[in-house]
Image (cartoon, rainbow, N blue to C red):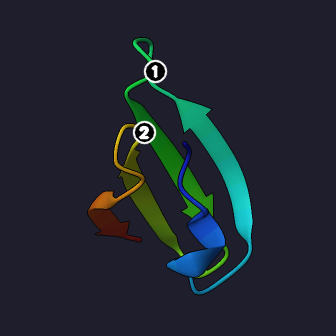
């Protein structure tokens, strides 16, 4: 199951990328944050502010 980025991102999700092994998803949003998600748990594992 994949995370639902809009549940934590405050702005629209503008970009999504998967890691080469499929274990992590990165999202970039209009609120100037990038977030990393664990694809096994669907939980957010990191946030980066721009």
Instruction: Please rate how many residues cluster around mark 1, counting C-alpha atoms within 10 Å: few if below 14, some from 14 to 19, many from 20.
Output: few
Q: Quadrant of the N terminus?
A: top right
Residue denoted by label 1: 22
Residue denoted by label 2: 39
Q: Secondary structure at mark 1?
A: loop
Q: Residue at x 32, y 65 (%)?
A: 48
* Residue extending farthest left: 45
- Is the residue 49 above or below the residue 36 in the image? below
- Give how far across and how far down residue 12 sits, in percent: 74, 75
Q: Residue at x 67, y 76 (%)?
A: 30
> Marks 1 and 2, how far apart in space?
7 Å
Residue 10 lies in what quarter of the image? bottom right
Q: Residue at x 37, y 27 (%)?
A: 23
* Residue extending farthest bottom: 10
Which of 42 and 25 lies nearest the eye of the viewer? 42
Residue 35 lies in what quarter of the image? bottom left
Q: Quadrant of the C terminus?
A: bottom left
């Amino acid at each position: 199951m994949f995370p639902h980025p809009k549940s934590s991102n405050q702005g629209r999700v503008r970009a999504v990328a998967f890691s080469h092994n499929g274990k992590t998803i990165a999202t970039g949003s209009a609120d100037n944050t990038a977030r990393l998600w664990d694809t096994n748990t669907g939980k957010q594992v990191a946030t980066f502010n721009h």
